């Protein structure tokens, strides 16, 4: 058995609450003018690559589930989309989504501009409204929802030796956040999920997140610090640390022998970008993964032919940001048959859809059972 697991920042976010649902649900199968071009492009990428399990980042959360249902019915399953021969319809019987911290009011002035606006940088996670930049999982395999763990509300200060931002000398020194800020501020800018999926060989834990970009801050580097610790959380979690408390009050990380993958747009790279040097390295070291073991693409090289790290890029803005990471111990049950970044060269018939869909590229790993 081969299982393809993928992550994709689909950029299906909109500037105000309900906008994505409006776009996706107004679909009229007899009127192609109602078909959203970006949603079509995202769907065609998914349909072409055909992952069995998929984490989608940046899909605005909708508590009713109507946005996700409409995307599946009108775009993923629609046989009448253009290029359907290249990308046949695909059906996911298992669909999972949950709330995230983006756009949730905090009542605090996190960015210290003198105004507690309850949105943008003052929200619990950067966002214009609750649920913006959400995430979801689609699966061909049973999702064990009763065993799902969320760490949405885990406070940053609950992490031992957290890298909390400090004001620079120019900013006056001392802690950037006061105690009232820290009593409200979660570690997760979106959420951290441990979502178990039942495969034929046993349970596979999907460790899903979307850490904040390590930019849009000042000398205190508050976003870079948060990005570092959001990634560090998974390093500690897979090592079985006991400090983390999930949203149901259950303490601790994975137990020895648990099979897992770490998925998502981590907004960090080993060699480029604004993330702290150790942000990604700390996790890769724990998983025993080297830069040369990460997937590459010809399309990325074509996009940036003069950059030494181009072949590993997963975003059009020239960075390796998106990952499906597997531990060395995964070889007890599986071996990695193939991995890749779906970034076709410009001559490919799928190139236009890839470019229109998102500024990120889909990343996948094929696991073959032993």
Image: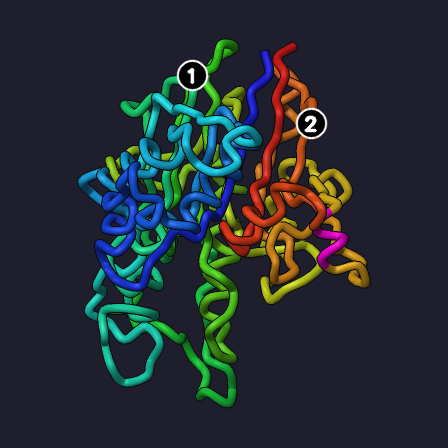
Residue 183 can be seen in this image: no
Image spot of residue 340 (x, y percent): 67, 36
Tag 1 residue:
198
Left or right? Give the position of 361 relative to 128: right
Q: How is the image coloured?
A: rainbow
Image spot of residue 370 (x, y percent): 65, 10
Q: Residue at x 62, y 25 (%)?
A: 366
Q: Residue at x 78, y 61 (%)?
A: 307
Q: Closer to the N terminus: mark 2 or mark 1?
A: 1
Determine the secondary structure under disc 1: strand
Image spot of residue 235 (x, y percent): 54, 42
Tag 2 residue:
338
**In the image, which residues are magenta?**
299-303
Depth check, front residue: 288 or 89: 89
Magenta stretch holds residue 340: no
Magenta segment's dominant SS is: helix
């Amino acid at each position: 058995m081969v299982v393809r697991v993928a992550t994709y920042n689909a950029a299906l976010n909109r500037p105000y609450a309900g906008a994505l649902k409006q776009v996706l649900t107004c679909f009229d199968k007899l009127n192609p003018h109602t078909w959203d071009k970006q949603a079509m492009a995202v769907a065609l990428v998914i349909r072409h690559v055909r992952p069995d399990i998929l984490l989608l980042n940046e899909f605005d959360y909708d508590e009713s589930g109507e946005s996700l249902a409409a995307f599946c019915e009108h775009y993923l399953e629609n046989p009448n989309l253009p290029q359907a021969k290249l990308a046949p319809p695909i059906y996911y019987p298992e669909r999972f989504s949950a709330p995230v911290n983006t756009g949730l009011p905090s009542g605090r002035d996190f960015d210290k501009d003198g105004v507690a606006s309850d949105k943008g940088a003052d929200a619990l996670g950067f966002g214009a409204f609750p649920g913006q930049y959400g995430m979801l999982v689609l699966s061909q395999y049973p999702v064990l929802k009763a065993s799902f763990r969320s760490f949405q509300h885990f406070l940053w200060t609950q992490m031992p030796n957290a890298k909390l931002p400090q004001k620079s000398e120019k900013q006056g020194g001392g802690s950037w956040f006061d105690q009232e800020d820290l009593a409200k501020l979660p570690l997760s800018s979106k959420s951290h999920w441990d979502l178990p999926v039942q495969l034929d060989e046993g349970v596979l834990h999907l460790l899903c997140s979307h850490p904040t970009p390590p930019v849009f801050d000042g000398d205190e580097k508050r976003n870079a610090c948060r990005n570092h610790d959001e990634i560090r959380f998974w390093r500690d979690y897979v090592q079985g640390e006991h400090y983390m408390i999930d949203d149901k009050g259950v303490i601790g990380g994975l137990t020895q022998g648990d099979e897992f993958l770490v998925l998502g747009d981590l907004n960090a790279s080993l060699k480029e970008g604004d993330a702290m040097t150790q942000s990604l390295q700390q996790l890769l070291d724990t998983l025993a993964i080297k830069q040369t073991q990460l997937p590459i693409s010809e399309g990325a090289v074509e996009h940036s032919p003069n950059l030494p790290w181009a072949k590993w890029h997963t975003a059009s803005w020239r960075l390796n940001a998106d990952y499906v990471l597997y531990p060395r111990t995964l070889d007890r049950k599986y071996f990695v048959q193939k991995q890749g970044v779906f970034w076709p060269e410009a001559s490919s018939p799928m190139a236009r859809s890839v470019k229109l869909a998102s500024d990120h590229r889909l990343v996948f790993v094929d696991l073959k059972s032993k």
